[in-house]
């Protein structure tokens, strides 16, 4: 496991399975660790991770074996403007095909003063053009 001794393991699901996490109040950033087993994935196998309307990973229609994602821990992180639900969907049909999910962290990211200043400049510029 990426952090500790516990996590989620999804393999040989014999169809699509959804792992759904409700939105966490005040959290606008999500981080997670994902391990995809090094296996002979079939063309109809897929892994999808989304946070609300944002797609973090989607292997639908792609050959997982050719994406250079297998056999190591991958770190994903994204930020949203609102609280979102995390959905992880896995579809496999062999015992050696699977994913491990660990170290899921929700946090509240506050924009830095510099980011706020740039946002303000962008708003001012857009008003001038009108």
Image (cartoon, grey):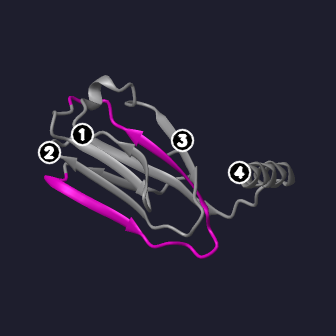
Q: Secondary structure at mark 4?
A: helix
User: Which residue lies under the disc numbered 4?
Assistant: 126
The magenta stretch spans which residues? Answer: 13-40
Q: Earlier in the sequence, mark 4 or mark 2?
A: 2
User: Mark 2 touching mark 1, by CB under 8 A?
Assistant: yes
- Cα–Cα span, label 4 and label 3: 36 Å
Separation of marks 2 and 1 at Cα, in angstroms: 7 Å
Q: Which residue is mark 3?
A: 75
Q: Nearer the viewer, mark 3 or mark 2?
A: 3
Residue beneath disc 2: 93
Residue lying farthest front?
A: 130
Viewer can see residue 3: no
- Mark yes or no: residue 49 visible: yes
Q: Nearer the viewer, mark 4 or mark 2?
A: 4
| Label 1, residues with CA under 10 Å away: few <14, some 14-19, many ≥20 | many
Q: Name the residue located 24 percent from the left edge and 59 percent from the top edge.
A: 17
Is 28 placed above or below 92 here? Answer: below
Density class for disc 3 (Cα within 10 Å; few <14, some 14-19, many ≥20) is some
- As measured in the structure, the alpha-carbon distance from the residue carrying label 4 to the one carrying label 2 is 52 Å
Residue at coordinates 28% horizontally, 31% vertically from top-left?
A: 64
At a point 80% along the width and 48% down the height, the residue shown is 118
Residue 33: image location, x then y, percent: 51, 46
Left or right position of 75 against 45: right
Disc 3 to disc 1, how far (Cα)? 19 Å
């Amino acid at each position: 496991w990426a952090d500790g001794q516990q996590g989620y393991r999804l393999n040989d699901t014999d169809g699509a399975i959804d792992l759904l996490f409700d939105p966490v109040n005040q959290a606008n950033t999500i981080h997670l660790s994902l391990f995809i087993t090094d296996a002979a994935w079939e063309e109809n196998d897929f892994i999808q991770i989304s946070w609300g309307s944002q797609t973090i990973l989607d292997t639908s229609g792609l050959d997982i074996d050719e994406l250079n994602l297998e056999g190591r821990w991958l770190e994903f992180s994204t930020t949203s403007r609102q609280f979102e639900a995390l959905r992880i969907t896995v579809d496999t049909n062999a015992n050696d095909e699977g994913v491990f999910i660990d170290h899921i962290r929700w946090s509240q990211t506050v924009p830095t003063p510099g980011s706020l200043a740039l946002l303000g400049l962008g708003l001012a510029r857009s008003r001038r053009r009108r």
